[in-house]
Image: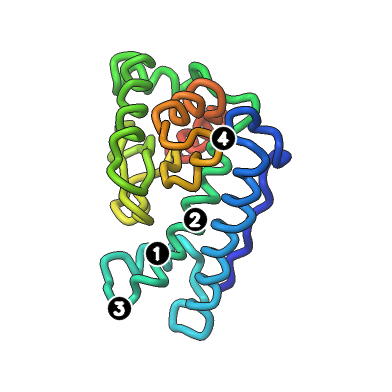
Amino acid sequence: MAYSQPALPYADNALAPHISTETIGFHYGKHHATYIKKYNDMVAGTSLDDQNIEDVIVATANNPEKAGLFNNGAQAWNHSFYWNSLSPNGGGKPSGEIAGKIDTDFSNYDAFKEELANAAATQFGSGWAWLVLDKGQLKVVKTANAQTPLTSGMIPILTIDVWEHAYYLDFQNRRPDYVAAVIDDLLNWDFASQNFLNAQV
């Protein structure tokens, strides 16, 4: 089935000065939109056309003959998840159940923050850094290119996009500065908390 690009959950200037309106215009308006168009074109008329995008991603993972469909589908989904992982009122320490779980699984918030920042900064080339729930434990993982935790049975909680188009207009080659800005000022802990609570049901 066709996948529609979700509306941004905030105005295109709401993440400034950390992520500019210009970056949103290119990243959401062009890159993300193009992944979705290509995915819809590729899935139409196939045996997978009646499935939702998450099921198509899982079904086409590690299949070289379906690499184009997987890459565009996963990038479409990853980006939608990324926009929701950000908030103009985000950043800082979480509260509630997810905060306690972070303390349990990472020792404390600062240790989690360091691990997430390191994963995002050291992902070679293009990719993603994720907070996931894996068999009941919160973990930080990183994935290359279009790869996503969905194909490994892990539940995504938050993500940081570290493809260059996510940050280059605003930070040039200073990826660690972009990552720090996302963690300190933009991470959407309300979204993360809801994902965490949904995973407990």
**Amino acid under label 1?**
Asn
**Pick the front one: 109 or 169:** 169
Question: Residue 86, which numbered label?
Answer: 4
Q: CA distance from mark 2 to mark 3?
A: 20 Å
* Figure check: 189 above or below 72: above
Residue at left offset 53%, top offset 81%: 44
Residue 71's disc is 1
Q: Would you call the spot at circle 1 few (<14 residues within 10 Å), some (14-19), or many (20 or more)?
A: many
Q: Residue at x 31, y 41 (%)?
A: 142
- In terms of sequence position, does the residue under pointer 2 or pointer 1 come before the other? 1
Kindly report the distance in space between the C-alpha atoms of the residues bearing marks 1 and 4. Answer: 23 Å
Give the structural element (helix, strand or loop) at label 4: loop
Measured as percent of width and height from the top left, residue 21 is found at 67, 40
| Tag 4: amino acid | Leu
Q: Amino acid at mark 2?
A: Trp
- Label 4: few (<14), some or many (≥20) within 10 Å? many
Q: Which mark is first along the chain, 2 or 4?
A: 2
* Residue at numbered disc 3: 65
Q: Earlier in the sequence, mark 1 or mark 3?
A: 3
Cα distance in 3D space between marks 1 and 3? 12 Å
Residue matched to label 2: 77
Q: What's the distance in space between the residues labelled 4 and 2, CA to CA?
A: 15 Å
Disc 3 element: helix
The extreme front residue here reads 172
In the rendered structure, which disc, 2 or 3, sits on the residue that comes first in sequence?
3
Residue 42 spot, x, y in % from top left: 48, 77
- Where residue 123 appears, as percent x and y from the top left, is 30, 40
